Amino acid sequence: MVLLTELPPEIVQHVLGYVDPPDLAWIPRICQSFYHTVKGNSTLYKLVYLNNFDTPPANSNVNWEKAIKDIVRLQIICRRNRVQDKKNELPFVHDTVTSLLRNAATDTERVRSTTHPSSRNADLLNSLFEDETNQSAFLCRSFIYERARGELTGDDYSDTPPKPHHQKSAHLHCLYGVPMLYAHPESHRTRRSKMGPFACSKVYDLRRYTDLTKWGPFMDDTTDRVDWEKVEAILIVIGNNLRKLGLTKFPVCKNFWEAPFAGTWPGSYKPLPITREPDPLELQDPYGATGTWLRVVCFLDYTDFFAYNFTSEDQPPLHIPRPAIDVGEATRLILMKIRVTRIEPPGPDDGQDLPVVHFEGISRSLDDSYDENANSDLRGSVRLTREGEVRWTTFSVFSGVERWRSESVQIGGVRSAKGIMGHWFDKDFDPRGPAGPTAFWKVSDRVTESGGYHALMQDFLPLIQDQPDESTDEYDAGHSGEDDEDEEDEPGLELEITGISWVAWTDD
């Protein structure tokens, strides 16, 4: 009988390539032969990586040994029982998670009822962050969560300038993609621990809309860096409103807002099959702007908005957040169809790796209630920031005149399936507002050719029929709890959300 150690080295290496990543730590301790086989063997580490995780993009420069060791360490950290035993590992966890997503698959089969491919990297992260102690230790550590839990006192009770650990936690939360709606995901979930009012206090505070931030989710300085705590607040506000309306029960929203790590990596948008030929400009567009997008816009009644920002006699200092606000919001669903119209080189203030792409199109309300601001022409641009994030600018155009503007950032990077989140506001930056959160995500590459742009519901049918959703909430992060009786769907939803009967879309 031939011992494993007596086989040729290439066969031994091939066999060891199928071990679980944690096993590479103890295999070298078995004998001297295995020690020399494993130690410094980049090819072996690469085999183990590719047999267990996604094949990285061709332009990736992966240190295979470090990547394996980091993943194993991440798994060990996430298996610790107590939140307190994990919290100090936030910087490492952030770097490892972002590395796994940066190297996630883009060429595998599309996940049913979504627009992103399957990914072993994302599946691993999903399994790790199912643990609510991991959610608490890494996803709920930004300023608004610490504020909601009453952990801030004195000089700490200031959200400017943003602190690095706050930003890293908020960034992880945005990549996770499912809004954590309670301050204590690992324990009690009560009305008092709801995050919606605290997120609203950040999103609707007009003091945060400045020239340096471009009125978007960017830092209030000259760096053009993304302020991930602002993006996180947008995620919470919009996600909370979609749940209240019951829209997250339907695949067209659920698979973008309720699935962890769903397409939050570069190049993850995987379109549904279409029959048309792309035009030349579309082929040159690295961002994939042309197509059909579903947009959500939330806003306060202007009386509430104005009162919150201007009528209080006791205005807090600029570095102190306004009080939590829970006065009710309106939510609009809008269908956008856009097409690339022009591509030009990046300007001196843009990221230089990709061009600036301009687009035009239309937006049409999916609401029964008439809203003159929902139906408009649309134009805008998409470009890289200097730090390499994807910045989207849109203008709503009425009778040829620009009225509303939005500044947003794409979660996950270029051509990610997760979509775009940001702020909408008056195009002239009116210091009295209004302003609020918006998000949009791509549902199809389809662009109706005959008769110009038409808001056709058939664009959504593949997402609806691919996987009919008859369940309530298979995944309900940060949402369940005995004290949640006031979170029922709003009555009359199916009558309010129109022409689309959300529960009865068919081939007809």
Image (cartoon, rainbow, N blue to C red):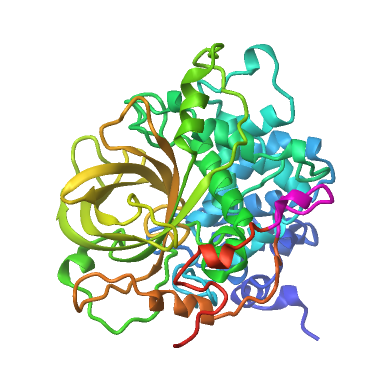
**In the rendered image, which quarter contains the C terminus?**
bottom left
76 vs 336, nearest the viewer: 336
In the image: residue 300, left or right of residue 80: left
Vertical placement of 18 versus 219: above or below?
below
In magenta, the rendered stretch is: 476-488
Counting from the top left corner in percent of width and height, residue 353 is at: 26, 48
Vertical placement of 434 versus 156: above or below?
below
Counting from the top left corner in percent of width and height, residue 264 is at: 50, 57
55 vs 292, nearest the viewer: 292
Q: Is residue 254 visible?
A: no
In the image: residue 74, left or right of residue 403: right
Q: Is residue 483 magenta?
A: yes
Counting from the top left corner in percent of width and height, residue 464 is at: 52, 77
**In the rendered image, which quarter contains the N terminus?**
bottom right
Residue under the image location 55 percent in, 29 percent down: 164
Give the mark count: 0
Vertical placement of 149 versus 444: above or below?
above
Counting from the top left corner in percent of width and height, residue 364 is at: 34, 61
Q: Is residue 151 visible?
A: yes
Residue under the image location 52 percent in, 56 percent down: 101
138 vs 159, nearest the viewer: 159
Residue under the image location 71 percent in, 56 percent down: 488
Q: Main secondary structure of the magenta part?
A: loop
In the image: residue 349, left or right of residue 6: left
Q: Is residue 301 magenta?
A: no
